[in-house]
């Protein structure tokens, strides 16, 4: 069984319209939502073995606020090609992951995160699938399970959506 956790960065600031997109920080709402999502991940006993994160400021800040809630055993890699990665780029990255990584987490951006989640999640709770199909809000988390031994064979609709949570839906 393989587990893929997809975490979209938390809400970022647009206070400085001249600021480069890559360097946009989290806003107050994002700084509040990210640790709440981290706590939720801990409650769900999510323990990624490898975390791939876009190097953009808002994704790094999101991960930094989530990490204190997770087990400290995960390897973390900040990869340039995850910045605004497309669905196809994300799928290639997932398929290149070694089979020894049973739980992969990606911290990234839309529209790629939404695209890859809807592409891979072929089954699961119908209400959660409908919610995921509608949108992937900031700090949203999708967890998709695959009955596979290798990431290289993961394809369209092969996954089962275990959960889809957003900060607004947290209890």
Image (spheres, rainbow, N blue to C red):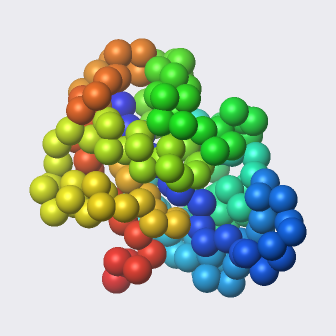
25 or 40: nearer the viewer: 25
Is residue 165 placed above or below 109 in the rendered structure? below
Q: Is residue 19 visible to the viewer in this orientation of the structure? A: yes
* 55 relative position to 152: left or right: right
* 103 relative position to 56: left or right: left
Q: Position of residue 113 (x, y in %)?
A: 48, 47
The quarter in which the N terminus is drawn is: top left
62 or 44: nearer the viewer: 62
Q: Residue at x 45, y 66 (%)?
A: 137
Query: Which of the 4 image quadrants contains residue 51?
Result: top right
Is residue 50 placed above or below 84 in the rendered structure? above
Is residue 25 placed above or below 156 in the rendered structure? below
* 50 relative position to 83: left or right: left
The quarter in which the C terminus is drawn is: bottom left
Q: Residue at x 50, y 44 (%)?
A: 112
Q: Position of residue 81 (x, y in %)?
A: 69, 33
Q: Is residue 64 visible to the viewer in this orientation of the structure? A: no
Query: Which of the 4 image quadrants contains residue 145?
Result: top left
Q: Position of residue 135 (x, y in %)?
A: 37, 61
Q: Residue at x 73, y 75 (%)?
A: 14
Q: Residue at x 52, y 66 (%)?
A: 138
* 53 relative position to 106: left or right: right
């Amino acid at each position: 069984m393989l587990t893929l956790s997809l975490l979209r960065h938390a809400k970022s600031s647009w206070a400085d319209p001249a600021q480069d997109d890559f360097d946009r920080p989290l806003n107050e709402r994002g700084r509040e939502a990210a640790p709440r999502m981290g706590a939720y991940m801990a409650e769900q006993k999510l323990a990624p073995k490898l975390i791939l994160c876009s190097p953009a400021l808002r994704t790094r800040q999101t991960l930094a606020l989530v990490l204190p809630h997770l087990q400290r055993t995960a390897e973390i890699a900040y990869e340039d090609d995850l910045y605004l990665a497309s669905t196809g780029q994300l799928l290639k990255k997932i398929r290149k992951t070694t089979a020894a990584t049973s739980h992969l987490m990606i911290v990234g951006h839309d529209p790629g995160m939404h695209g890859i989640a809807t592409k891979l999640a072929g089954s699961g709770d119908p209400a959660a699938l409908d919610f995921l199909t509608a949108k992937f809000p900031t700090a949203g988390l999708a967890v998709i399970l695959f009955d596979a031994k290798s990431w290289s064979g993961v394809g369209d609709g092969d996954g089962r959506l275990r959960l889809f949570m957003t900060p607004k839906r947290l209890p």
